[in-house]
Amino acid sequence: MLVAFYSEFIVNSISNIIASGTISTTFVSLILLLIIRNATKYVIVVTVAYKDKISLVINIAIKSSIQIALLVLPFIIILG
């Protein structure tokens, strides 16, 4: 229930910011939403680590690192 409330709050806030013209839709879709998505992942990691499930924390960290590497590698090849 709390997640639904926060999601609705974030969507309304983003809609208001885009409507006011302060931030472009491209910036929101490419940068801001990814930051929010990763923030929720980090909250989950901290919660799981607090419950002493270190193997799951390491698994999430490795998968996040691989995901970032697969995203950045094509840009490095193109720019390099």
Image (cartoon, rainbow, N blue to C red):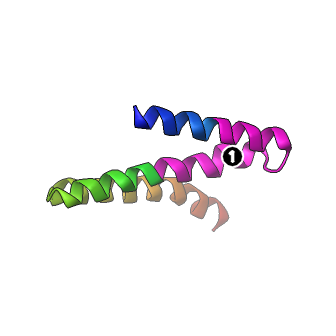
Helix, strand or loop at mark 1: helix
* Horizontal side, residue 33 vs residue 48: left or right: right
Corner quadrant of residue 69:
bottom left
Q: Amino acid at mark 1?
A: Val
Q: Position of residue 68 (x, y in %)?
A: 46, 57
| Viewer-proximal residue among 74 and 11 | 11
| Viewer-proximal residue among 21 and 68 | 21
Which residue position is annotated with label 1? Answer: 28
Q: Position of residue 9 (x, y in %)?
A: 58, 38
Please tell me whether residue 16 belongs to the stretch shown in magenta: yes
Q: Crowding at label 1, few (<14), some or many (≥20) Cα neighbours within 10 Å?
A: some
Residue 24 against residue 43 in the figure, above or below: above
- Residue at x 53%, y 59% (from the top left corner): 72
- Residue at x 39%, y 50% (from the top left corner): 41
Corner quadrant of residue 14:
top right
Q: What segment carries the magenta color?
A: 12-38
Residue 80 against residue 38 in the figure, above or below: below
Q: Position of residue 44 (x, y in %)?
A: 32, 51
- Residue at x 49%, y 47% (from the top left corner): 37
- Main SS type for the magenta part? helix
